[in-house]
Amino acid sequence: MAMAQIIAVSNQKGGVGKTTTSVNLSASLAAAGHKSLLIDFDPQRNASTGLSIKNTEMNIYSLLSGNSSFVDSVRDTAIKNLYLLPSTMDLAALEFELAHNAGRESCLKNCLNDCVKDFEFVFIDCPPSFGILSLNAWVAADYVLIPLQCEYYALEGLVSLLNNVLRIKRGFNKTLEVSGVVLTMHDKRSSLTQQIEADVRQNLGEKVYKTVIPRNVKIAEAPSHGKPVLTYDIRCPGTIAYLELATEFLRKHGASLK
C-alpha cells in the first residue's frame, strides 16, 4: 500500500474557510471511496464539532502527551471512510509545553510515523496562526493546502504564508510542497472577487485550483448540525463545489476516483 499523503490545511488568517475546507474536502474524498483521516489540530476544535464529535479524553493532545494510543484516539464519523482525530482546548497548552523542548517541531511527525499508513489522505486542520502547532503540522506534512478568502486582507497575508512555507522547506522539511490555493467565499458578482481571483491566478498560475468555493448559506449552516455540507444538502452549490474540488485534488495528487 502506498504511503498516506499528509496535507496541512493552513492560513495564518482566520475566517478564510480553512476548517470548512478541511472538513468538506476530506468528507468528499471519503465519499468517493478514499480512506481519509482528518486531524483537528486547532484548540478551537471546530472540525471536531463540525463532525459531531464531542469532547473526549482521548484526542490529539492526549496522543501527543503519551496518554492515549493512536487507535484509541481516532474516531469514526457518520461518513464511511472518514475518520477524525479530535482536538481539545487543552491543545493550546502544547505551545508552552514544547517551547523549550529539543526537536519540538517534529513532535507530531514522530507521533504519527507509521500510524497513518492505512489511510490514503491525512488532512491536518491547522490553527489560524503560525506558532508551534502550525510548525508541527508543516513538518509532518507532504503538502500545504491554502484556502484563500476573496478579499484584500486575505490576499495581503498570502505572500507571508508562502514565504513561511519556503522557510520550513529550507529548515525542517525539504520535501514540503504547496498543493495549491483554493479560493473560498467566492462571489462571482463582486468586482473585488474578480480582481483578487485574477491577481492570484496571474501570480501563482497552476498553483491555484480551478475550482472555486462559492458563498453558500448551506456551507455556513452545515457545521451547526454537526455535518459536512455533503450530508446536509447534497444538491446545494457548496456540495457540488467541494465534490469538484475533490476530483481536481485527486488529479493533482496522482489519484483517481473509485
Image: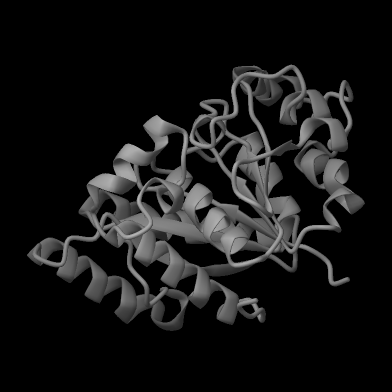
Query: Can residue 204 be seen by looking at this rendering?
Result: yes
- State whether residue 27 is above or below residue 125: below
- State whether residue 13 is above or below residue 142: above
Q: Residue at x 74, y 26 (%)?
A: 61
- State whether residue 178 is above or below residue 232: below
- Total number of numbered labels? 0
**6 sits to left or right of 185:** right
In x, y percent, where is residue 69? 89, 31
Query: Can residue 10 be seen by looking at this rendering?
Result: no
Residue closest to the eye, 163 or 43: 43
Q: Quadrant of residue 204?
A: bottom left
In x, y percent, where is residue 112? 84, 46
In x, y percent, where is residue 154? 31, 51
Q: Quadrant of residue 106?
A: top right
Q: Residue at x 51, y 29 (%)?
A: 49
Residue closest to the eye, 125 or 107: 125
Quadrant where the N terminus sits is bottom right
Q: Residue at x 59, y 36 (%)?
A: 131
Colour theme: one colour
Quadrant where the C terminus sits is bottom right
Residue closest to the eye, 51 or 87: 51
**107 sits to left or right of 12:** right
Q: Residue at x 54, y 29 (%)?
A: 45
In x, y percent, where is residue 116? 82, 52
**103 sits to left or right of 192:** right
- State whether residue 247 is above or below residue 144: below
